[in-house]
Structure formats: C-alpha cells, structure tokens
C-alpha cells in the first residue's frame, strides 16, 4: 500500500492557532479540539443527521473553530460537562471552520456558538448561559426537564424521528403544472426526478421531506423543493434529459436548469438551498434610525446589526453623506448572506446610543457592530471605506476582533427624529445675524 502525506499550506497566523501532531507515518496532521477518547461526540455533515436529527435524545452542540481562543478556553469545560452528562444528555461538537455548510445551516456567525437540540430538532435553541461545566450541566438538565414535561403533557414536538419533516412541504409537480409552478416563478426551485421503484429514491425521500420543511421555514417560503414522478410524467423527464434516478435539478427564473451536485442528506440539501436563497436575495435595506421601534426590531431580530454614525449634514452636505451611504450599501450587498441588520444615524441625533458605544463627540464617521443577544459590540478601528469595513466585518464573522459590553448592559434609549430629506443642510434661522440695519460705513469709527 502506497501511503503518503498530503501537502498542507497554512499562513503563519493559522499555524500558531491550530493544533498540529505527527501521525504514525511521520505525517503532519491537523486536529480539532476534541479526540475520539473524549465523551464529546465529534459531529460532521456525514453523521449529523443520523446522530442528532434522528435522535430522541436532547443534544447540546458546540460549533467551534480550532483557532478561536474562546473555543480553546471552553474545551476543558465542555469535556467535563460531557462526562457529567454521559447517558443523560448528548454533548457534541462541530468544527465549523472545517464544516462551514453545517455551521451556516444553523446561522453560526461567531465562535463558539452553542445550540440546544430538544423536542423540535429543526428549531434548536441558542444557549445563552455561562461557559463553566457547572453552568452547562445545569442548562442541560433544565432543558431536559422541559422536554420531559412536554412529553408528559402530550407535546411531542416536531423535527425528531426518522424524517424531521412532512411530505406536504414537497410540491408534487406534473406535466400540467410544472411550467406555471416552477418556470414562471420568481423563486428558486430544487426539483427531484424520481422513480417509485428506485432504491436510492426511497432512501432520499425522508431526507428530501425533512429538507423541504426546513427550507420553507428558513427562507420564508422563497426556496421550494418539488418532486416529479418521471415514470408517469415522461414528457418532463425527456425535456430535461433525465437518464438516471434520482436526478435533482435547480431552477432559477430566466436561467438554464443546473444539476445539483451536493450530498443527499437533509443537511447537505438545506445548506445548498440556503446558499441559493442568499445568492438570489436582495441586499438588506439600509435604515435610518428614526425611533425606538425600528432600532430594537432590527437589532433584536438579527445576529448582528451594523450601525454607522455619520457626520452632521452641515459638515458633509448631501453629496458627502450619499458617498458614505453608498459604501454601506455596497457592504450590505457583499455580506447579504449573513442577513445582518444595517442602520445609520446622524452624529448628535442619538447621543445615548453614541455614549453606550463609546463614540460621541468626534471621530465621525464611526461604525459599530452590535450583538443584542449578548449585549456586546465591536468598533471599526480602520478607515470608513470599502476595504476598511470589509476587513472589520470579515474579522467579526470569523469570531475575531475585540469586543466590549454595551454601556449599561442594555440597548440604549433611542429618540424619535425626522428623516433626512436628502438635501444639503441649512443653518437654523436663529443662527443668522441680520445685518440689514447696520451701516457698514460707520464700522471702525470711534464715537466722540
């Protein structure tokens, strides 16, 4: 047997952060934070559906990156918790740096992120507790009590069991309805062409159904999964050159259908559907902070809300302000897959907000990214430019960058203001001095 090592290329930064070891062949291999000897189950896209989604057990799952300092600090506590909960609650870990699709499927934007998979496996809860083994164990037992209580009251939840979805969310497509339903739709479609006698199709069926339910929920019904019985609707099968089963094709309005090349587990299908949704979605809207409602809704609903404090209109004029807003809109487009919230305000309009973020008084334009769930924020230290903001947000999305607690430990009060009218600013009338009655010829003369 010819055994050899693959070349590994890493940056110096990565080399310092990752853990390396030599295997029995003298080859350099890269390891995550957990090993087979731990009570922490190592989860990957290939075993996640079987281990977690199809399990009746309660699961605590950590999504981590090996280079993340906070993850490295959590590791011994996570292992202790897993040992304490052995046989009671399942504890797992996903290297989300290596398995990005699995992390993306559950909206993982920073590390470590911990999710609790309870009765409804399709809608895990975010763990918000402390990072000691004691706090983790207590949260697990609390979630377990709730799960048992629900079962006693007859609430079985949804999302566990063999499929985690319902066939009703898979749209049945035929020769008669295909063009109107799929080709004329503005939405994205993943369509399976199957044969009832096909063993691979039977294996795919529960995964396809589970994925259909999750995709419908996570994309707000903008990406659909359909199925065509190609033995009955042979016209469709012929039109798209179907030669084997199952065949999956992706349909986007105005484009030629694309062959689906991904895996056939629920998680693989959902990950591809979410990518398609992000690609097809418009950039998020950029909102001016005009009052409490919009500010709290956007920051509470999103993983991060990115806020710019722009100079006063009298300092920049409309052209200068529009230049800053254009940079923000380009960044919102670039990071639209993150589905963050994007806000801006004029310097001085929201002093409580500025104070809570440590901005206030100078250094405009300024930018902060807020995680309202953790009451943490990070400040842009570089330039307010496409390259500066991109570097700032890229570091945050990878779990890096320095953060601080929001002043007061709660979202600040936001005041109601009038929206910008898109024009250059004008000084208030009381700031003008009326010189119409002054005789300029008398200025400078000494009075006798």
Image (cartoon, rainbow, N blue to C red):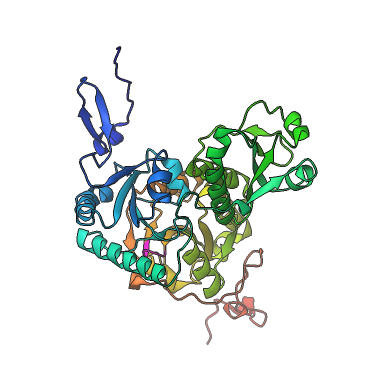
Magenta run includes residue 374:
yes
The percent position of residue 393, horizontal first and vertical second, equals 44, 49
Q: Decide whether the magenta segment is chiefly helix, strand or loop.
A: loop
Task: State the residue at coordinates (29%, 45%).
Answer: 41
Q: Is residue 355 visible?
A: no
Q: How many marks?
A: 0
The magenta segment:
372-376
Q: Is residue 153 left or right of residue 318?
A: left
Splitting the image into 4 quarters, where does residue 9 fall? top left
**In this orientation, which residue lies closer to the viewer: 281 or 267?**
267
Q: Is residue 33 left or right of residue 204?
A: left
Give above or below for 153 relative to 364: below
The percent position of residue 226, horizontal first and vertical second, equals 65, 45
**In this orientation, which residue lies closer to the viewer: 282 or 333?**
282
Task: State the residue at coordinates (42%, 40%).
Answer: 45
Q: Is residue 112 left or right of residue 159?
A: left
Q: Is residue 412 left or right of residue 179?
A: left
Task: State the residue at coordinates (55%, 70%).
Answer: 294
Magenta run includes residue 115:
no
> Which residue is situated farthest in the bottom direction here?
448
């Amino acid at each position: 047997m010819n055994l050899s090592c693959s070349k590994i290329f890493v940056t110096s930064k990565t080399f310092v952060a990752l853990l390396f070891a030599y295997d029995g062949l003298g080859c350099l291999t890269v390891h995550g934070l957990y090993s087979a000897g731990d009570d922490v189950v190592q989860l990957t896209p290939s075993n996640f559906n079987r281990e977690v989604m199809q399990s009746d057990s309660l699961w605590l799952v950590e999504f981590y990156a090996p280079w993340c300092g906070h993850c490295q600090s959590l590791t011994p506590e996570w292992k202790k918790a897993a040992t304490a909960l052995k046989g009671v609650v399942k504890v797992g870990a996903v290297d989300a740096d290596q398995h990005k699709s699995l992390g993306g499927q559950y909206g993982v934007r920073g590390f470590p992120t911990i999710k609790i998979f309870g009765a409804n496996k399709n809608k895990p809860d975010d763990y918000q507790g402390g990072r000691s083994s004691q706090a983790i164990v207590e949260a697990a037992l609390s979630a377990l009590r709730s799960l048992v209580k629900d079962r006693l009251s007859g609430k079985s939840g949804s999302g566990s069991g063999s499929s985690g979805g319902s066939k009703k969310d898979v749209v049945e497509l035929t020769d008669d309805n295909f063009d109107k339903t799929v080709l004329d739709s503005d939405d994205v479609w993943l369509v399976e062409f199957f044969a009832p006698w096909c063993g691979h199709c039977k294996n795919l069926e529960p995964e396809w159904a589970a994925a259909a339910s999750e995709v419908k929920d996570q994309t707000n019904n903008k990406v659909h999964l359909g199925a065509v019985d190609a033995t009955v609707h042979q016209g469709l099968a012929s039109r798209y050159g179907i030669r084997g089963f199952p065949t999956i094709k992706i349909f986007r309005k105005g484009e030629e259908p694309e062959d689906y090349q991904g895996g056939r587990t629920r998680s693989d299908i959902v990950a591809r559907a979410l990518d398609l949704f992000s690609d097809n979605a418009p950039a998020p809207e950029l909102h001016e902070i005009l009052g409490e409602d919009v500010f709290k809704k956007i920051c509470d609903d999103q993983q991060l809300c990115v806020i710019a404090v722009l100079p006063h209109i009298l300092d920049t004029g409309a052209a200068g302000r529009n230049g800053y807003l254009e940079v923000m809109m380009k960044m919102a487009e670039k990071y639209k897959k993150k589905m963050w919230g994007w806000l801006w305000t004029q310097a001085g309009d929201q002093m409580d907000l500025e104070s809570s973020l440590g901005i206030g008084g100078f250094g405009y334009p300024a930018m902060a990214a807020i995680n309202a769930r953790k009451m943490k924020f990070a400040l842009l230290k570089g330039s307010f430019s496409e390259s500066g903001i991109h570097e700032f947000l890229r570091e945050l999305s990878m779990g890096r960058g320095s953060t601080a607690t929001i002043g007061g430990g709660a979202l600040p009060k936001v005041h109601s203001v009038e929206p910008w009218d898109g024009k250059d600013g004008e000084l208030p009338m009381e700031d003008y001095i009326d010189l119409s009655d002054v005789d300029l010829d008398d200025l400078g003369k000494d009075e006798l």
